[in-house]
């Protein structure tokens, strides 16, 4: 499919490519609108906080593009792209997407949930860096790089299962506390219908994102954007489009908590699901280039720490200054990538 898309877009004019991009963005927005709407309905019918729904069901759906791109890249002998996509997506999700979201409007915080999920978010990022460190030659880390071993990928996938089980138990407890009387059959029928529609929306988001990436890569090549920049920023941005569409749609619908939950959950899944599964299916693990230790990992940890500071200082919402800070870090990250 990818080769067919490359051949198709290669034969189109630049104007046609821009028109296709605009059409794909429209499809993404409509699919995200359906996805968020059904997620909110599930949250309301089950009595589960929308932020928790965003950190589990919604983030799983919006992270599927990253997972598919990374696993396929690893299997096709391009492990650098696999890890770069995961780390770049965390930076993009937290820096660009959450930054833009908080700039549009202060995002409400459910402190009980954001603290539980948020510390897992930071812990997952730290764990990824620790797994990638070359302990046998730490003194030459900026000259030789590192590696995310296959066994570490397996551990991350196991932790993914634990994370979902823990979230499931937490969600059940929240739902039991607000369980409506005598409506279980009716709720079950509506729930199945909503989940099916969400699955359809995820499929549409996934397909349009995949086509959009190929179209954007062709445009980048024509504009002579370096391949390294494409891998570190364009691919990560392209696979993060579902999160961007979901977050902006959530804010427009007055569901800021769902937006924050989606980004937190997506960051966790980018480590446990995306990087973990890509490393687990690669015998030699994922190679970690030197620029990850000098640029990518420090920026990833920085945006996660700034986000935590914003949560700590914000009383009941993520303020605009936090959004401006996160967005500024992302823009500097892009500039550094281009300079390098």
Image: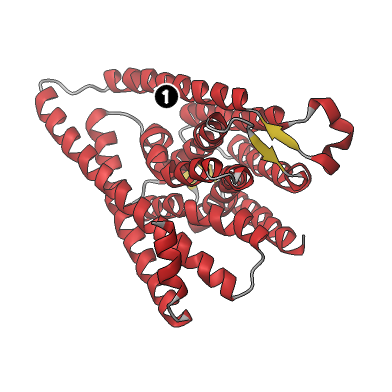
Residue 171 horizontal side relative to residue 297, left or right: left
Question: Residue 4: x percent and y percent?
Answer: 40, 63
Q: Is residue 181 visible?
A: yes
Q: Which residue is mark 1?
A: 164
Name the image quarter holding the C terminus: bottom right
Position of residue 333 relative to residue 263, above or below, is below
Nearest the viewer among 190 and 226 is: 226
Who's the residue at 71% across and 58% down the image? 337
Q: Residues within 10 Å of mark 1 (few under 14, many from 20)?
A: some
Question: Residue 48: x percent and y percent?
Answer: 32, 29
Position of residue 222 relative to residue 133, above or below, is below
Nearest the viewer among 147 and 239 is: 147
Determine whether the residue tagged by mark 1 lies in a helix, strand or loop: helix
Position of residue 71 relative to residue 26, above or below, is above
Question: Residue 266: x percent and y percent?
Answer: 48, 39
Q: Is residue 316 visible?
A: no
Nearest the viewer among 262 and 148 is: 148
Nearest the viewer among 301 and 83 is: 83
Residue 234 horizontal side relative to residue 49, left or right: right
Residue 9 horizontal side relative to residue 233, left or right: left
Name the image quarter holding the N terminus: bottom left
């Amino acid at each position: 499919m990818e080769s067919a898309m490359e051949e198709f877009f290669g034969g189109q004019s630049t104007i046609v490519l821009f028109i296709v991009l605009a059409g794909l963005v429209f499809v993404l927005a409509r699919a995200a609108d359906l996805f968020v709407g059904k997620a909110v309905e599930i949250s309301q019918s089950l009595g589960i906080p929308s932020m928790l729904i965003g950190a589990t069901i919604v983030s799983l759906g919006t992270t599927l593009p990253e997972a598919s791109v990374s696993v396929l890249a690893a299997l096709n002998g391009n492990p650098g792209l696999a890890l770069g996509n995961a780390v770049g997506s965390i930076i993009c999700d937290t820096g660009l997407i959450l930054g833009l979201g908080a700039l549009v409007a202060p995002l409400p915080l459910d402190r009980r949930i954001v603290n539980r999920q948020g510390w897992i978010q930071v812990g997952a990022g730290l764990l990824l860096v620790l797994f990638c460190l070359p302990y046998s030659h730490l003194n030459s880390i900026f000259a030789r790089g590192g590696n995310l071993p296959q066994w570490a990928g397996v551990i991350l996938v196991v932790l993914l299962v634990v994370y979902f089980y823990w979230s499931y138990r937490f969600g059940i407890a929240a739902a039991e506390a607000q369980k409506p009387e005598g409506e279980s059959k009716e709720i079950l029928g509506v729930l199945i219908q909503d989940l099916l529609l969400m699955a359809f929306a995820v499929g549409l988001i996934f397909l349009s994102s995949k086509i959009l990436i190929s179209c954007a890569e062709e445009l980048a090549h024509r504009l002579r954007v370096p391949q390294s920049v494409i891998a570190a920023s364009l691919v990560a941005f392209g696979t993060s489009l579902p999160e961007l569409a979901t977050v902006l749609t959530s804010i427009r619908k007055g569901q800021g908590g769902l937006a924050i939950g989606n980004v937190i959950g997506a960051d966790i899944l980018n480590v446990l699901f995306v990087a973990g599964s890509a490393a687990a299916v690669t015998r030699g693990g994922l190679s970690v280039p030197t620029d990850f230790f000098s640029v990518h990992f420090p920026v990833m940890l920085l945006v996660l720490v700034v986000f935590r500071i914003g949560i700590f200082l914000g009383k009941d919402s993520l303020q605009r200054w936090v959004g401006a800070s996160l967005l500024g870090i992302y823009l500097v990250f892009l500039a550094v990538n281009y300079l390098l």
